[in-house]
C-alpha cells in the first residue's frame, strides 16, 4: 500500500519539523514522500529516511521519493548536475521520481527567484523537449528510476509525447487536484496516455494570501464533505482524500501535525458509493487555490 506525504509548499519549514514529520509519517505507513530542492528541507527528509532504514523499520526500496527540477535549471547541461546536487543533499543514490516542476523557466543562476530592478521575474526561453532529453539521460544513468512533469497542461504534455525520438514518456503529471478543482479533462487525457495524475493540495490549502486564492471558500468546511464524513465517522479531509484515490488520483497531503498525518492515512477502511462520488464531483468550481503568481503575465 502506498500513501503520500507532501513535505512542504513553496516555503521553508521550521528547522527540525520536517525531520520529525517524515519519521512520524514513515512509522504511520507512508512510503511516498514528495520533496523539492526549493523547499530547503531535503537534508532533513534524507536524514529521516536514513534513520528509519538504520532502525530496520524500512529498506530504501520501500520508499518512493520524488524530487523536482527547479525553474532556473531547465538548460539541458544543468539538469544532471542539479539532480546530483539533490542526491548529495539527500545522501541517497537515486530518486524514485524526478519531475520538471514547472513548464516555464527562470534565468539560470544562483537566485532561485531572479527579478529585475522593477521587481519583475526574469524569465528564460525554455526548450522543454531539450530539457526532457536531459531528464531521460538521468533515468538512463540510474539517478532517477522514473521521470515526470508538474503543472503541465495538455498542450505541453503533447509536446513531450510527440517529440521525435522520445525514449521515456512522463510517468506522472503533478497538478492541483481536489473536489473544488477536479481537472476532469486533464485527468481523462492523462489516463489515455498512462500518465498518473498526482494531486497536490488535495485538501485545499492554508489561507496564506501571498500564494493562495482566499476568495474560494475553505474546502474542508464544505457541507457535502462533512455530511458524507458523518455517515462514515470520517473527517471532511478523509472524505476528500478518499474521493481522489477512488478517481485514480495519487494524493500528497501536507501536514506537520502528528494527529493529522495519522488521520490522512486512515482512508483505506471505507469507500464512497457511486452516488457519493457524483455528489462530490459536482462540487467542482474549476477554481485553483494555489495561485502560481510566478507564471508569466500572472
Image (spheres, rainbow, N blue to C red):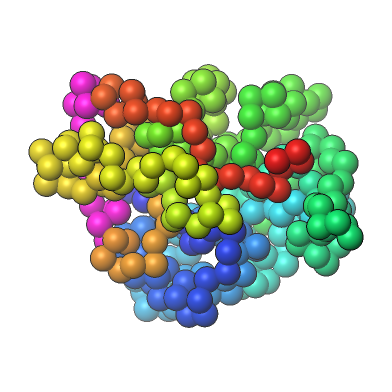
Residue 189, located in which quarter of the rendered image? top right
Magenta highlight on residue 267: yes
Residue 149, located in which quarter of the rendered image? top right
The answer to whether residue 207 of the structure is visible from this angle is yes
Q: Residue at x 33, y 67 (%)?
A: 257
Whether 88 is drawn above or below 287: the answer is below
Q: In this view, does 144 lie to the left or right of 201?
A: right
Which quadrant is the C terminus positioned in?
top right
Q: Between residues 222 and 72, which one lies in front from this camera angle?
A: 222
Q: Between residues 160 and 71, which one lies in front from this camera angle?
A: 71
Q: Residue at x 41, y 46 (%)?
A: 204
Q: Which residue is drawn at 57% across and 37% down?
A: 173
Q: Residue at x 30, y 54 (%)?
A: 264
Residue 125 point in image, percent of width and height: 88, 41
Q: Is residue 44 left or right of residue 274?
A: right
Q: Between residues 42 and 10, which one lies in front from this camera angle?
A: 10
Please state the extent of the stretch shown in magenta in the rendering: 262-277
Magenta highlight on residue 243: no
Residue 241, located in which quarter of the rendered image? top left
Amino acid at each position: 500500500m502506498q500513501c503520500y506525504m507532501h513535505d512542504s509548499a513553496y516555503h521553508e519549514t521550521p528547522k527540525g519539523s520536517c525531520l520529525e514529520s517524515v519519521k512520524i509519517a514513515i512509522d504511520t505507513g507512508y512510503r511516498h514522500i514528495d520533496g523539492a530542492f526549493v523547499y530547503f528541507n531535503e537534508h532533513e527528509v534524507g536524514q529521516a529516511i536514513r534513520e528509519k532504514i538504520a532502525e530496520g523499520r524500512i529498506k530504501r526500496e520501500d520508499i518512493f521519493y520524488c524530487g523536482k527540477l527547479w525553474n532556473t535549471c531547465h538548460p539541458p547541461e544543468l539538469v544532471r548536475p542539479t539532480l546530483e546536487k539533490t542526491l548529495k543533499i539527500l545522501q541517497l543514490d537515486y530518486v524514485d521520481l524526478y519531475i520538471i516542476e514547472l513548464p516555464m523557466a527562470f534565468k539560470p543562476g544562483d537566485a532561485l527567484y531572479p527579478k529585475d530592478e522593477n521587481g519583475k521575474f526574469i524569465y528564460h526561453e525554455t526548450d522543454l523537449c531539450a530539457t526532457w532529453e536531459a531528464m531521460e539521460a538521468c533515468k538512463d544513468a540510474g539517478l532517477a528510476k522514473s521521470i515526470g512533469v508538474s503543472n503541465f497542461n495538455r498542450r505541453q504534455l503533447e509536446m513531450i509525447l510527440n517529440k521525435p525520438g522520445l525514449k521515456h514518456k512522463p510517468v506522472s503529471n503533478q497538478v492541483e487536484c481536489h473536489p473544488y478543482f477536479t481537472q476532469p479533462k486533464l485527468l481523462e487525457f492523462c489516463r489515455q496516455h498512462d500518465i498518473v495524475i498526482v494531486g497536490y493540495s488535495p485538501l485545499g490549502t492554508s489561507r496564506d494570501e501571498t500564494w493562495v486564492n482566499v476568495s474560494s471558500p475553505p474546502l474542508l468546511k464544505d457541507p457535502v464533505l462533512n455530511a458524507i464524513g458523518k455517515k462514515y465517522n470520517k473527517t471532511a479531509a478523509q472524505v476528500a482524500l478518499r474521493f481522489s484515490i477512488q478517481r485514480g488520483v495519487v494524493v500528497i497531503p501536507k501536514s506537520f501535525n502528528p494527529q493529522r498525518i495519522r488521520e490522512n492515512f486512515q482512508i483505506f477502511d471505507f469507500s464512497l458509493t457511486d452516488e457519493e462520488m457524483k455528489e462530490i464531483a459536482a462540487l467542482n468550481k474549476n477554481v485553483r487555490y494555489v495561485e502560481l503568481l510566478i507564471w508569466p503575465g500572472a
